[in-house]
Image (cartoon, grey):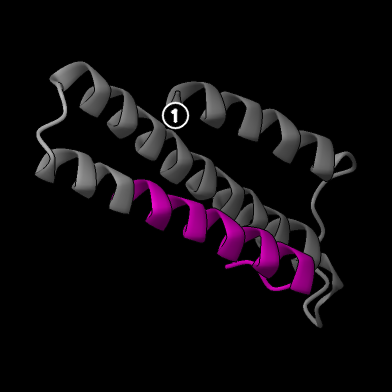
Amino acid sequence: MPHSPDDKKRAINRLRRIRGQAEALELAVEQGADCGALLQQIAALRGAATGLMAEVLESHLRETFLEAGRGPDQRRLADGGAAEIDGIMRIVRSYLK
């Protein structure tokens, strides 16, 4: 879950775009748009949702593994933890495409 004000604002903006895309898709179906146009809109909607999912996942990983090291139990991610999370997210994003 995005916690910083900037992250929340970015997530809300993405959600609003996704809602707009879903409403446009609904309208296109109601108006009988051709399948090619519908498929293009569906792909855009899916891409937007996938992008949001990747952002929330990355935020969760950073919060869980990097911020946890600042807690009372003093868990620490090995040196280069941020770089490791970047690498993991590159892999995850490639599978989400």
* Magenta: main secondary structure: helix
Q: Residue at x 63, y 34 (%)?
A: 89
Q: Residue furthest bottom?
A: 72
Q: Residue at x 60, y 48 (%)?
A: 55
Q: Residue at x 77, y 66 (%)?
A: 6
Q: Is residue 7 magenta?
A: yes
Residue 3, percent from left and from top: 69, 73
Above or below 68: residue 14: above
Dot 1: element: helix
Residue 88, percent from left and from top: 63, 32
Residue nearest the viewer, comparing 31 with 38: 31
Mark 1 is on which residue type? Leu
Residue 93, percent from left and from top: 55, 29
Left or right, residue 2 beside residue 33 = right
Left or right, residue 69 beside residue 51 = right
Q: Which residue is mark 1?
A: 96
Residue nearest the viewer, comparing 60 with 49: 49
Q: Residue at x 47, y 41 (%)?
A: 48
Left or right, residue 49 beside residue 88 = left
Above or below 94: residue 74: below
Residue extent of the magenta highlight: 1-22
Residue 41, percent from left and from top: 32, 31
